[in-house]
Amino acid sequence: MDLDTKTAPAKFGTVIGVAPGNVFVYSSDYESADDDELPTRQAYRSYVDDVYMGHKWQCVEFARRWLYVNYGYVFDDIAMAYDIFRLETVRVVRENRLLPLRSFRNGAKRPPEPGCLLIWEEGGEFETTGHVAIVTEVTREYVRIVEQNVGDRVWPAGQNYSREIKAEATSDGHYWLECSFGDATILGWTIQTDDDTHAERFAKPDSRLFALQARELTATLEDPGEWLNVANADEAAYVTMMKGHKLSGRDTDLHKYYCLSESALAELRRATNELHALFLHATNYVLDSDSRLARFNIPRALWPKIRQSWNNRRTQMITGRFDFSLSERGLKVYEYNCDSASCHMEAGKIQGRWARHFGCDDGSDPGRQLHERLRDAWRHSDVDSVLHIMQDDDPEETYHALFMQEAMEAGGISSKIVRGISDFRWAEDGGILDADGVPVRWVWKTWAWETALDQLRAECEDDEIRLPPRRAGADPKPAPRLVDVLLRREIMVYEPLWTLIPSNKAILPVLWQMFPDYPYLLNSSYELTDELRAGGYVEKPIVGRGGANISMFDGDLNLRAETGGQFDDRDQVYQELFALPFVGGYNVQVSTFSSAGRYAGACVRVDESPVINMRSDNLAVRIVSDRELTRT
C-alpha cells in the first residue's frame, strides 16, 4: 500500500488512527508542534501509569506503549529503533520479571504474527535510527502494521492499521516481506516466545577480536620530513604545539600504531550510541530530583538554569568523547566528556595524515568521517549569526578551536576566535560586544563549565542576586566576567549548560543504579562498598580533568597508581577497577566521539602510567578485518 503524499500531514499530536487494543496513534509532524502546548523538552516525554514510553510521538514510543497496553510488558531503552532486533527480553512491569524475546530475520521459516515487532535497519527512509512497527494481521500475501512517525496522515474511515506490506511465502517455508521503501531494509521481526526455532543466534564475538594489536612501520627515511600543511591554520598551530610534524611526542614512537578489528569497531559504535542515550536518561533522572542533583556539588543558584537548559536545549549538544577500556576482557566505559572534550583534531585529521605520509595501508582510519559529522551537527544547529569561539591563549586549545572552526564554517556558520574575555565590553542595551562591536549571541568554548563555576563560587557563592541581568544604560564598569558571558539568558553556549550533569562523575553511580549490570557500565558508588574493595576500585573526584586526583587500588587494597591535581577538594566516587590493557609497551585507552548523539569516530591515547592524563600521547589507530587481526 502506497503512503498518501498528496494531503498535508496532520498537526503534531493529532490522533490519526486507533490500533487494535484501542491504542491511539498520533501524528509526529514536529514542524507543526505548538510551543505553547509543549513549552519544554520535558513535555515531549510520554508516560502511561508513570512508566516511560518514549519521546512523543516517535515509532519506539508507540511500539512500547502498544505492548504495555495490550500485554503489560515493555522492552528496555534502546538508542535506535534497529537496536530492538538484538534485545533478548521484555519486562513485565507489574511483576518486574523478564520474558524471552526472539528475533527472526526477514525470510525466516517462522513468519511474523500479530503483536510482534517489525524492525527496519538504519538507512534510506529510516536513516540513522531505523524503524519499528507493530504487526496486527498476517496472511501469505501481506501483513498489516501500525506505526508512528511515517506519513503522519489520518487513516481512511474504518481502517485500523497504518499500511499494508506485501509478503511472499515460498514453497520451502520461508516468509519474506517487501521493504516497501526502495531505500530501506526490513531486518525482520521480534516475537515474545520461548521457542527459538529458526530464531537469530547472536553469539558473542570471539574475545580475541577485542584485543588491540601494536604494530610498527619499517622506517624508510631517517628524516620523516614535513607532512602537515602549515598553510592551514589548525595544522600550523598543531605543529607549533608538538614542536614538529609528528603525532606522538616521543621520537621513538614515530612509526608505531595500533590496530582494532572491524568487530571491535562495531561494538564501539554500538556502545557509543547506546551509552549516549543512557547518559541522557540518567541526566533527566538527576534533574528530576533536588536530592539527586545535590550530589553534583553545583551551586544551587544554577539549578534553575540547568533545568531550563535541559528543557529547551536537550538536542543541541554538538559533540562529546567517551573513554573506554577495550580488551579481550570486554568493553567498559570510564566516563563521558560531553562538556569540553579534546582530541578531535588528532582523531579527525592528524592520524589520517600520518598514515598517508608514512604509507600505512593497514585497514582504514576510524576518524576519517569525524570532521564531516561535526560539520553536519553545526549545519543543523540553531546558530543564526556570528558564533564566538572562546579559548585561553593555550597552544592545544588553539589548534582544537581552529579545527572546530573549520567544521563550523563548512556547516555555513560564521565564527570569530576570541582568546580570553578582556576585549569584551557592555553594550548600551545591556548585552555584550566583542572588540569589533559585534554582539555576542552564540558561543562555543574550549573551557569546561566547571571553570565558570569556580568563578561563580568565588565571586557569587550561592547568591542569585549577584547574577542579575545587565540593564540598558548601566555603568560600563566593571568589565564583563566569564560568568556574565556564559550564564546570560540571551547568549546560547555550546556545549549547553545541562552537559554539566553527564560530564560530572557523580552520574556514574546513578547510571549503575538505573541500569545495573549493563554490559558497558562499571559498578560505581558514592560510598566504598565491600564489593568494590574485593575486586579493586578507582577513587576519582566528581569533577576533574586530564586524569587528575585519581587513586587506583587492586583487590588486595594495594595502591597501584595515584595522580595529583587541583581537584582534591571535590567529592569522590568509587568505580570498579577495570584496568586498561597493556599493549606495545603502553597502557592504551580507546576513545570514541559522538556528534549530535551518534558515533562519529575513534582514537587511542597511550601512557606508561595506568591513568591517562593531559600529557598522554595519541598514536594512530587503524581498523582491520577480523580475519587479519586474528591471523597475525
Image (cartoon, rainbow, N blue to C red):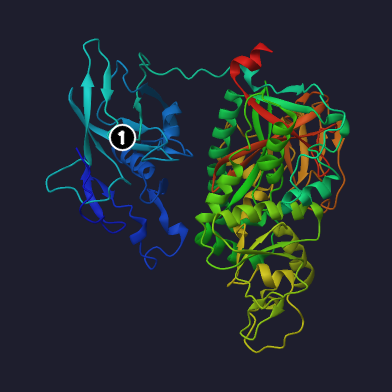
Looking at the image, how many numbered discs can be counted on the residues?
A: 1
Q: Quadrant of residue 350?
A: top right
Q: Which residue shows up at 73% across the image and 69% down it?
A: 482
Residue 59: x and y, percent? 35, 43
Judge by depth and name the residue closer to the eye, 35 or 510.
35
Where is 324 relative to 287, above or below? Answer: above
Residue 422 spot, x, y in % from top left: 78, 73
Which quadrant does the C terminus fall into?
A: top right
Position of the N terminus, as image quadrant, is top left
In the rendered image of this protein, does residue 17 appear above or below residue 599? Answer: below
Could you tell whether 263 is left or right of 131 in the image? right
User: Image check: 294 left or right of 205?
Assistant: right
Q: Where residue 394 sits in the image (x, y, percent)?
A: 81, 56
Element at badge 1?
A: loop
Q: Is residue 511 left or right of residue 358?
A: left
- x and y percent of residue 23 in the render? 26, 45
Residue 441 shows in this picture: yes
In terms of depth relative to the viewer, which is nearer, 500 or 623?
A: 623
Residue 558 in sight in this render: no
Q: Residue at x 57, y 23 (%)?
A: 263
Q: Relative to residue 62, is residue 631 depicted above or below?
A: above
Task: Give, as a three-letter code, the residue at label 1.
Answer: Gly
Disc 1 designates what residue? 182
